[in-house]
């Protein structure tokens, strides 16, 4: 997964380079800067003294001393002054310059804190958006694993409106399914009075599960009749079952990898466009490409569905090829469903939301 959001102390991350949110003097300070200097030891400050400071938006590189990485890239983010003083362009430049330096030193992995989003006051949601934009556009032309390190949950919130919408969606769908399961077993809902009669389950807005159920009859009527005739001539007692079996056997003709490659062609995408949009690294894509029977993990399969901007029904098909289905008993699945139903296919936004709800990320 080329971009990973992790919750950690950046000084603990094992990768080729970590990025420091420094100030113009490069001589240390508070926040992540203080933590990095403390963990690296005196040698870092001595080297920083030789650098002659750094302009806002620029970056400089040093050794890492006692840190578990090879380099520290020091970048100076803008102080937030309301947004009208070129803060965004400067912040974008911090990410670009840092990534350029990492590339020059052939780094394969780099960890960023959310630059400017602490003492310098840049609003966190916007700081995260800038980080995601710049890193993903860099990764479009370069192979690197980039960590965005968030220190604590409070310092990381996707749009509160989005979080609230998703929470409501999870609530509606998750609860409904449990209600149905419980009421069909004649069990009370938690918190319900035992003597109270059960009402009908709350109707939810149609999700794509509902649509899928409606479109499940995929075998054309004529074909289905032929299969049933064949079943009858073999003396099968359950022609319906033969129909289902024949359909299932027939449907193994295209594997996950074959369907993926076909869809990439149909969408007029290049392979690289697709795996980058899916937040999948090139090596994994090559494995999938070269092995028609490759079985991806569910998050990987879904990442491709998002990258290909598949409809809910197509997503179902692609997942099925890999042996999976979405379920309303999983928050992860419901969050994915939320985005696909709304035809919102930005994998980084989806990953931010998954992260917010403590779910595994796509890719
Ligand atoms: N690991 C990961 N992230 C961290 C850590 C850590 N150990 N510590 C803090 N953060 P800040 P700035 C997060 O204030 O806003 C210094 O004095 C923190 O929650 O470190 O760019 C410099 O010398 C926040 O989200 O950097 C400058 O004077 C993010 O890192 C000034 O602060 C950045 O917060 C730079 O301010």
Image: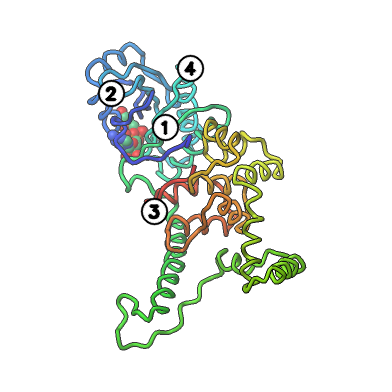
Q: Which residue is mark 2?
A: 67
Residue 233, x across and y down, in percent: 72, 70
The single residue placed furthest to the top in the displayed view is: 50
Sequence order check, earlier mark of 3 and 2: 2
Image disc number at residue 78: 1
Disc 4 under 8 Å from ligand 1? The reply is: no
Sequence order check, earlier mark of 4 and 3: 4
Secondary structure under tag 4 reads: helix
Which quadrant would residue 23 be assigned to in this image?
top left
Residue 30, x across and y down, in percent: 26, 31
Disc 2 under 8 Å from ligand 1? The reply is: no
Q: CA distance from mark 1 to mark 2?
A: 26 Å
Q: Residues within 10 Å of mark 2 (few under 14, many from 20)?
A: many
Secondary structure under tag 1 reads: loop
Q: CA distance from mark 1 to mark 3?
A: 30 Å
Image disc number at residue 202: none
Image disc number at residue 357: 3
Question: Which color scheme does this rendered protein use?
Answer: rainbow
Image disc number at residue 104: 4
The single residue placed furthest to the right in the displayed view is: 222
């Amino acid at each position: 997964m080329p971009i990973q959001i992790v919750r950690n102390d950046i000084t603990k991350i094992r990768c080729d380079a970590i990025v420091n949110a420094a100030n113009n003097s490069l001589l240390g300070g508070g926040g992540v800067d203080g933590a990095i200097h403390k963990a690296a030891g005196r040698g870092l400050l001595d080297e920083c003294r030789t650098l002659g400071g750094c302009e806002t938006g620029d970056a400089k590189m040093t050794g890492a001393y006692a840190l578990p990485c090879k380099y520290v890239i020091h970048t100076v983010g803008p102080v937030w002054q309301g947004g009208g003083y070129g803060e965004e362009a400067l912040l974008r430049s911090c990410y670009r310059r840092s990534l350029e330096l990492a590339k020059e030193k052939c780094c394969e992995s780099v960890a960023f804190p959310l630059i400017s989003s602490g003492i310098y006051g840049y609003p966190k949601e916007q700081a995260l958006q800038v980080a995601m934009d710049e890193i993903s556009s860099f990764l479009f032309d370069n192979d690197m694993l980039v960590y965005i390190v968030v220190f604590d949950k409070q310092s990381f919130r996707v749009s509160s409106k989005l979080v609230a919408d998703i929470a409501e969606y999870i609530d509606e769908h998750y609860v409904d399914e449990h209600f149905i399961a419980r009421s069909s077993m004649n069990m009370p809902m938690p918190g319900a009075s035992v003597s109270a009669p059960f009402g009908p389950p709350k109707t939810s807005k149609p999700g794509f599960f509902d649509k899928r159920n409606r479109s499940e009859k995929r075998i054309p009527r004529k074909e289905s009749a032929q299969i049933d005739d064949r079943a009858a001539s073999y003396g099968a007692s359950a022609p319906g079952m033969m129909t289902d079996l024949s359909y299932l056997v027939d449907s193994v003709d295209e594997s996950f990898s074959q369907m993926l490659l076909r869809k990439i062609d149909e969408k007029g995408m290049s392979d690289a466009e697709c795996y980058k949009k899916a937040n999948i690294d090139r090596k994994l894509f090559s494995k999938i490409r070269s092995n028609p029977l490759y079985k991806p993990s569910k998050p990987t399969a879904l990442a491709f569905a998002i990258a290909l901007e598949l409809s809910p029904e197509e997503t179902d098909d692609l997942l099925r090829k890999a042996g999976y289905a979405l379920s309303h008993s999983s928050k992860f699945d419901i969050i994915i469903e939320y985005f696909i139903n709304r035809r919102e296919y930005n994998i980084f936004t989806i990953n931010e939301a998954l992260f917010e709800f403590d779910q595994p990320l796509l890719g």
